[in-house]
Image (tube, rainbow, N blue to C red):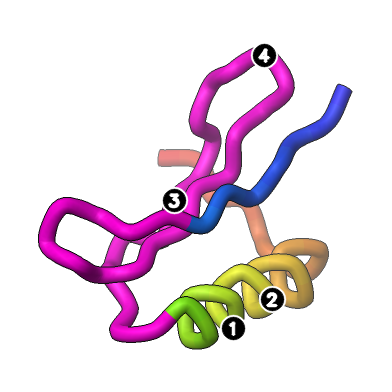
């Protein structure tokens, strides 16, 4: 199983990304809009490079 980053323009004209699992569920999203698709792609690359180091917190 895997997941795919999707880049899209929202209703307000901002660029966003979401990470969709192969089963169709959205498992993460940008949480903010970006002014250009290039900025949104930088957000995706940041998640891809930083996620392996992410800590897990239980509350």
How far apart are labels 2 and 3 at the CA level? 13 Å
Boundaries of the magenta span: 8-36
Task: Describe residue 22's horizontal placement relative to residue 17 as left or right.
Answer: right
How far apart are labels 2 and 1 at the CA level? 5 Å
For image coordinates 49% across by 48% down, the residue present is 18
Up the image or down, 9 lies above or below 6; here it is: below
Crowd class of label 4 (few under 14; some 14 to 19; many from 20; radius 10 Å): few
Up the image or down, 58 lies above or below 29; here it is: above
Q: Quadrant of residue 4?
A: top right
Looking at the rendered structure, the secondary structure element under dot 3 is strand
Whether residue 16 is in magenta: the answer is yes
Which circle's residue, 1 or 3, is located before the other in the chain? 3
How far apart are labels 1 and 4 at the CA level? 25 Å
Q: Which residue is mark 4?
A: 23
Residue 45's tag is 2
Residue that protrudes farthest toward the right in the picture: 1
Task: Describe residue 12's horizontal placement relative to residue 10 as left or right.
Answer: left
Residue that protrudes farthest toward the left in the picture: 12
Residue 47: x and y in percent read 64, 68
Q: Which residue is mark 3?
A: 29
Up the image or down, 3 lies above or below 13; here it is: above
Residue 42's tag is 1
């Amino acid at each position: 199983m895997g997941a795919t980053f999707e880049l899209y323009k929202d209703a307000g004209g901002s660029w966003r990304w979401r990470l969709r699992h192969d089963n169709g569920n959205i498992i993460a999203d940008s949480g903010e809009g970006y002014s250009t698709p290039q900025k949104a792609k930088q957000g995706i690359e940041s998640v891809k490079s930083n996620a392996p180091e992410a800590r897990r917190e239980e509350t």
